[in-house]
């Protein structure tokens, strides 16, 4: 009787260890959670810099690069329902940290207004690296909240330093906001000279199911400062 009880205890302990190991492996394999989204101020900014001008983008030591993105076919995920053999992805994944855009063409800031793509369903990446200056004109940037406004006709998703801040079920300004509605993404609550931000904007021509007979372009790209 005692031996049976001891065997049961050993079996239970073994199951507990196995369960903990499975949970640990699952946790290790889970993708890291993206940053919490921040809501930008609904106020008049203290200072605005237009990133669609040469002077504006140069103030941050930046330059714009762009590349068309495409839909590619691949195998279905291992846990897909039976009968589904295919998945679809985009290429390149240019929002990821460390992405190499050195081979991409550089465009003038004013060229963001150019109509891109062949029309209908199309996707483009726009990338730049921004460094916060100590001053822009007479405006002292130290301690200011910095907000990126990206207004793409028709939709956009915004990646900052390799991350798209988002949470399911709550307002996430870096994700699609609606038909021709700008993204306003908080870069930092308090910037200082030398802060760096890698910006990658994924532009989408839409509505996608309409396959519109028009093209993709920027309506606005700017940095707003709030003090």
Image (cartoon, helix red, strand yellow):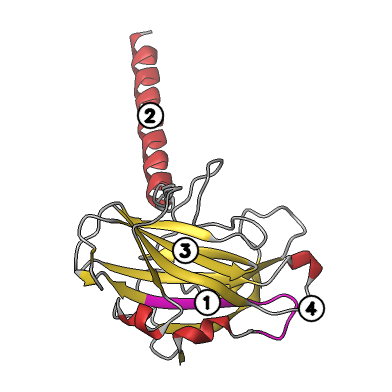
Q: Circle 1 — which element?
A: strand
Q: How many tags in the picture?
A: 4
Pick the quarter of the image with the N terminus: top left
Q: Residues within 10 Å of mark 1 (few under 14, many from 20)?
A: many
What is the residue that sits farthest to the top in this orientation?
Answer: 1
Alpha carbon separation for disc pair 3 and 4: 26 Å
Q: Residues within 10 Å of mark 3 (few under 14, many from 20)?
A: many
Q: Is residue 80 magenta?
A: no
In the image, is 171 to the left or to the right of 137?
right
Q: On screen, 225 above or below 57? A: above
Which of labels 1 and 4 is toward the front?
Answer: 4
Q: On screen, 147 above or below 217? A: above
Alpha carbon separation for disc pair 1 and 3: 16 Å
Could you say which is closer to the camera, residue 75 or residue 150?
150
| Mark 2 vs 3, N-terminal side | 2
Q: Which residue is mark 3?
A: 149
Q: Which residue is mark 1?
A: 125
Which residue is drawn at the image coordinates 56% and 75% (left, top)? 218
Which of labels 4 and 2 is toward the front?
Answer: 4
Which of labels 2 and 1 is toward the front?
Answer: 1
Q: Start and end of the magenta stretch?
A: 117-128
Q: Quadrant of residue 76?
A: bottom right
Could you say which is closer to the camera, residue 7 or residue 35?
35
Which residue is drawn at the image coordinates 37% and 20% (left, top)? 7
| Mark 1 vs 4, N-terminal side | 1
């Amino acid at each position: 009787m005692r031996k049976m009880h001891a065997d049961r205890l050993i079996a239970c302990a073994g199951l507990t260890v196995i369960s903990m190991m499975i949970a640990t492996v699952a946790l290790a394999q889970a993708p890291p959670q993206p940053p919490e989204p921040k809501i930008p101020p609904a106020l008049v900014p203290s200072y605005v810099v237009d990133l669609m001008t040469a002077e504006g983008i140069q103030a941050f030591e930046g330059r714009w690069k762009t590349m068309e993105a495409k839909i590619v076919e691949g195998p279905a995920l291992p846990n897909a329902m039976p009968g589904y053999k295919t998945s679809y992805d985009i290429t390149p994944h240019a929002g990821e940290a460390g992405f190499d855009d050195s081979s991409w063409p550089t465009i003038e800031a004013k060229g963001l207004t150019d109509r891109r793509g062949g029309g209908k369903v199309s996707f483009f990446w726009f990338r730049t690296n921004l460094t916060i200056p100590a001053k822009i004109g007479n405006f002292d940037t130290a301690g200011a909240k910095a907000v990126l406004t990206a207004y793409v006709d028709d939709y956009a998703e915004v990646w900052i330093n390799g991350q798209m801040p988002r949470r399911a079920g709550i307002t996430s300004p870096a994700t699609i906001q609606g038909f021709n509605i700008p993204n306003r993404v908080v870069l930092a609550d308090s910037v200082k000279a030398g802060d760096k931000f890698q910006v990658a904007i994924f532009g989408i021509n839409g509505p996608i199911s309409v396959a519109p007979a028009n093209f993709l372009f920027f309506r606005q790209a700017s940095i707003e400062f709030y003090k």
